[in-house]
């Protein structure tokens, strides 16, 4: 009776079958390496995300400030605090050269609407975001971001 561990091949030699698949140790080493690489990438990318959000808020505020200057040229004054930034999204009352000054009011990168005050801290107007924490003051990504 032939040994069941062996199989016959064409020339009648007995050959031990090859094991298929991976061992548990090989799988654990692979999972460990993937976890290590993921950790390194996450630690390298997350701090840059906060910086990118602050830069996006600054860019949005600059765009809104430019639209506010065009509004002032058409209407001889900035909108009052009651009208706020919504005045930029509506067509000019005097029937200016086109539609609204901006297509849609953006939210800040943290999902809250930008704030507007008239008069501002140094006269004129202020457009600002309260930062990541949504509260006045703060440091780093929690700091308020003002126009001008």
Image (cartoon, rainbow, N blue to C red):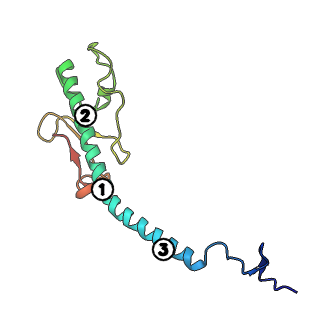
In the rendered image, residue 23, in percent from the top left (x then y), is placed at 61, 77
Query: Which-is-in-front pick, marks 2 and 1?
Result: 1
Whichever of callouts 3 and 2 sits on the residue coming sooner in the sequence is 3
Q: Which mark is residue 48?
A: 1
Relative to 95, is 54 above or below?
Answer: below
The residue sitting at 56% across, 79% down in the picture is 25
Circle 1 — which element?
helix
Question: Label 2: how many residues lie within 10 Å, few (<14), some (14-19) or many (20+)?
Answer: few
Crowding at dot 1, Cα within 10 Å, few <14 / some 14-19 / many 20+, comes out as few
Q: Position of residue 94 (x, y in %)?
A: 26, 13
Disc 3 vs disc 2: which is toward the camera? 3
Sequence-earlier tag: 3 or 1: 3
Q: Nearer the viewer, residue 16 or 125?
A: 16
**Can residue 133 be spotted in the picture?**
no
The residue identified by callout 3 is 32
| Rendered location of residue 124, percent (x, y) | 14, 33
Q: Quadrant of the C terminus?
A: top left
- Residue located beneath label 2 in the image: 63
> What is the distance, in whole Å, between disc 3 and disc 1 at their CAs?
25 Å
């Amino acid at each position: 009776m032939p040994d069941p561990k062996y199989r016959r091949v064409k020339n009648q030699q007995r050959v031990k079958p090859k094991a298929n698949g991976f061992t548990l140790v090989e799988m654990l080493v692979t999972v460990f390496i993937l976890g290590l690489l993921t950790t390194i990438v996450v630690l390298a990318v997350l701090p840059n995300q906060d910086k990118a959000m602050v830069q996006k808020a600054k860019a949005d505020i600059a765009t809104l400030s430019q639209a506010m200057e065009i509004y002032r040229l058409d209407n001889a004054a900035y909108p009052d605090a009651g009208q706020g930034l919504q005045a930029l999204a509506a067509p000019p009352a005097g029937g200016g050269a086109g539609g609204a000054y901006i297509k849609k009011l953006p939210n800040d990168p943290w999902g809250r609407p930008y704030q507007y005050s008239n008069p501002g801290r140094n006269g004129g107007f202020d457009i600002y975001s309260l930062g990541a924490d949504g509260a006045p003051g703060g440091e780093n990504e929690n700091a308020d971001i003002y126009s001008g």
